[in-house]
Every structure is written in structure tokens, then in C-alpha cells.
Amino acid sequence: MRRGKPEEHRAAEAARPIAVLAVACLLWAPAVGAQQAAWSRTADGRPDIQGYWEAGPGANNAGHSLEEGCCDAEHNRMQNRRADNIGLRQQIIVEPKDGRIPFQPWAAAKRREHLINLDAPTELQHIEPEDRCSLQGVPRSNLRGPIQILQTPGQVVILYEWVHAYRVIPVDGRPHAPRGAALWQGDARGRWEGDTLVVETTNFRYDPQGYNKQPWIDSHGTFYTDALRVVERWKVVDANRIDYEATIEDPKVFTRPWKIAYEIVRLRQRNYEFLEEACWEGVSVRHRLDAGRLAVKAGKVRIHSHNEQ
Amino acid sequence: MTSRRRSWFVVVALASVIAVAAVDARQQGSAEPYTPPRTPDGRPNIQGIYNPVGTFYNIEDLEYQSLYQNFKPNPAARGRSLVVDPPDGKIPYQPWAAEKRKPIYQLHLDPTPEWVDPNAHCWPQGVPRHVNNREFEIFQPPGYVVIFNLAHHTYRVIPVDGSPHIPENIKLWQGDSRGRWDGNTLVVDVANNNDQTWFDVMASFHSDAMRITERFTPVSPDRIEYRAVITDPKVYTRPWTFAIHFNRNKESGLEVWEEACVEANQKNIELLKRPGR
């Protein structure tokens, strides 16, 4: 939510020549020249990464499919998106090198089922969890619009605009919650390794029957079990950039750990604030179920994909 | 949520007793005003996890909680109200509003869809109800006070940096909060409320003209007195004051996790649409 505070704009106008001068001086000073925009530190000496951030342009569309991005021409037309905004700008899955999720054979089959149901949903759980306004889990939450990071000495907190979710990450060395505590966002424990915030998240809730009454890692049905462990590394590069990576392992679903990586950048809009995305508000999916049932009845079932456009 | 999980939440929502207000606020007798510790930026530090001492059911009559959730009378709570002003403990509805609300006293146990508690839809609870329902955490990074609710897994950000309210035409479930410190008391002005939330199960409603001034006053290391002055010239004849207190939850290692009450929770409403209604 962007709003102007006129008095601040005026102050900013007046300060501009001074700022230009200051920047010029900085560039001129040889000792500073080698450094990138420095960041400030919190009272306890950690990088101060408070403020508003979002996934950089390189991660555009990755929230829909980590392998393929989004979307097709028809979708773009419906959503008022640029017609050529298709696919991924960069490879998001950096390990394995082929950029594909290393599903075990049974899991690949289950995922294929999700992709078929996605296009012609006949049950509520066929509709992707994000559209049902559930919590998005990790690492998906970080790919869904702006985030606000807040810090006190023992906690890093991430607020999300998407479904008005929050995530509390203790950074005080406490142990994980007991195995039995299964959570949509998982149980996160963080620590600072130099200027990198390392967050290990376990204790994810999952649906052992259909693997669809649970968060997915992307819209393309990438599911997990209670064996999921996500290790995120938020490496502070400069005041406006965090190199983010997340290693995802679940020996019940994947043949090996895999890793996503992209840049997170500071939001540049002035006076940005989160209001609320009231994604609780009786979101109706009935028409989508009706359409899905008609499609199944007519035998028009296909795998959800963006390739045929 | 699976439907089993969903009904579990309904059970919790209906059966959970937050805490019956059995503790008399006037038991506190210390003469010295309490001075809380400070945050690094010099503000009173009221961080921590708290439990409200209030009632979920009927803020104008605390016995309802026992009668309709524990199914036994509680004469000690009978007629006791969390409304401390006006002195009669009743929300000062304008006549039309009192008339509109009448059926809920007959229907609160088995409401028609129109009278279903907004909390049963898993909607954001709004102010002040979100601090009157289960554990919440107060978190104070520089420039903000943030409240994380366990119930409904909502967060509420209260800037305490002197920033102005958002434009009046934007209406929000939790309103737009702007805070300031008045000595050791956090004073929050809540504007931009929508008209969809209630204060309890009893259809205690308001309009989108509602404005709230909250005061969070720490009176001991483990207790915060809370008052909300509620103004709504469209619905009430005068401002009224809702008062509860919060006790610090000292359970070892307690963390606020999540109540995943976020989904389009239509099932409850469907269940009520039975033939003949």
C-alpha cells in the first residue's frame, strides 16, 4: 500500500541536491569505492534487514512453478499481464543442474495426478492450496509478493502481505518443537552465520492420503511429507539485496536434496505499508468445481501445462 | 483444512473458554506506579506472550460463558460486564440497533446464517476482539508494536512513529492503527474499521464509523490493563468503554504457533441451512 505524505515529499525534494553531493563525495573517496551500499546493524550487532522486501525480477513467475514459471497467453490476457510475460527469467532450481525437481517415481505420478486435477477440479482439495487461502508454507511464502522483516534481539519476524500470514523465527538457539507438532508454516529456528541468516524449518503438516490438503511448494503440485526439512540461507549482500537460497530435502518424496536460489531486493516504493489481504472472506471455489466436473464429464482432461501455447 | 480439521476448529471455537473473569481487578493495591523496563530505543518494554482475562461469549454478561459452554450456572459472574462505562454495563445501542440485535438472544445457540458469529467464518476478529481470544504475543521492533494472535493466525502492526492514518475510504477488518506512548501507556487510535466484526458471540455489532482508542497500561511485570473506548455515532448513543486485563503467560518455552483458521470456512454456514430455515 503506497501513500504519499506530502510534507515528506517536500523534504525529500529539498534534500536532493545535498544527497547528490553526498553520493558524489562517496564515489570519489577511494576507500569506500570498493564497497557496496553498506547496511546498518541492530543493537546486538546483526545485519539490520528490517523493512520491506520482495523477490527480485529474476524470480518473476517462479511462485507458480519453480520449474516452468508462469503462464500462458490466455492466462496473461485474463489477468491483465503482459502478453510476453511467460516462463522463467532465470533458472530458479540451481540443484540439480537440470532445474527439475527430483521426484521419486511414485511422487512424480502423484504430482502428475495433481496437475490433472488442477485443470479440472472436482473436489475442493484439487484446487491449489494457495487459492484456498491457506498458509503457504516454506519456502513458498517468500515468493508470494512483498514481505516485511522485523527484528528484535531474539527473533526475526517475517510478515507477509499474502493471506496476511506471519512467521516468527527465534534466533536464540532454542531447540525445535517436538516432532508431533505439525504446522502449516513449519517450526523455524534461525541463527546468524556471519552476515547470513540461516533458518532451518521442520515439523511440517502434510496430508498422508492425497498430499493435497496441505501447502504445496508451488502451484504445480510440488508436495512434501512430514520428513520435509528446509534450510534457508538469507545472505545479506548489501543494504538493498539479499541472496536467498533454500535447500529442500524430503527423503520420502525426492531422490536427493534440491536447491532454489534467487535475489531478494528492497521495495523501493515510499511509505509502503501492509494493510490486509483478507483472504478469509468466503472465497468461493464452487464455480471452479462446477467447471471441473463438466470437463471431466465431457472427457476433456489434460495435464496442466504451459507448453502447448 | 480437511472437514475433520475444520470441525475440530469449530469445536475449539465453541468450546474453548478463554478465562472467566474471576479475578477482581481491584485486588491490586500497590501505591507505587509500575515502571516497565525499556526497549533499546527507550520505549516501555511490554513484549511477551499474554492471555486475556475476559470472556468469549457475552461481554455484557459473564455468566453466559459458563451457561452455554460449561453448561452450568455461575452466579458469581451473573450480570457482570466487561463494559465499565456506561455504569449499567450495557452497550449503549441506539433504539433501532437494540431492536435489530434482539433475535440473537433467542438464536445464539442455533443461529440462522445471518446471526452466525463472524469468528466462525475464520475472518479476522477486529479490535478489540482479537485481544480477547486466547494467547497473543506483543513484539516491539523499533518504530512498531506488533501483535501476533494465535487465534486466526493474524498479525496487527501498530506504527508508533507518528505516521498518519490511511485515507478514510479504505475499510479494513482490523482497522488502521496508529499508536503513541503516553508515559508507560500505549495509546492506539484505530480508524478505518469495516462493519463486519462483532465484540463477542452475541451480535454486538458496530458500523464502519467505529473509532476506537485503546490504552495498554502495564501495571506489573506480568499484567497489562486494557481499555478500549468505542465510539460509533451511527450505532451507539454515546462512547462506551470495554475493559479487561492481560496476564503474562509464563508457561516455560511457550511460543505462539498457528491456528490455521484461514480458509473459506463455508461448512458451518452450510450446516445451518437446513430445511425449514
Image (cartoon, helix red, strand yellow):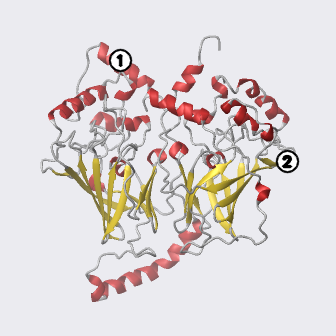
Image point (34%, 84%), residue name: A26
Nearer to us in this view, B98 or A191:
A191
Chain of the residue under the numbered disc 1 shown in the image: A
Nearer to us in this view, A109 or A36:
A109
Query: Residue A40, image x and y in percent?
Result: 41, 75
- Residue type beneath disc 2: Pro
Image point (42%, 29%), residue name: B2
Asked if residue A304 shows in the view, the reply is: yes
Q: Quadrant of residue A195?
A: bottom left
Q: Which residue is mark 1?
A: A293
Nearer to us in this view, A305 or B35:
B35
Q: Quadrant of residue A169?
A: bottom left
- Residue type beneath disc 1: Arg
Compared across the picture, whether A32 is left or right of A158 comes to left
Q: Which mark is residue B86?
A: 2
Q: From this viewpoint, which residue is outermost toward the right?
A: B87
Q: Is residue B222 above or below residue B106?
A: below
Q: Is residue B121 above or below residue B276?
A: below
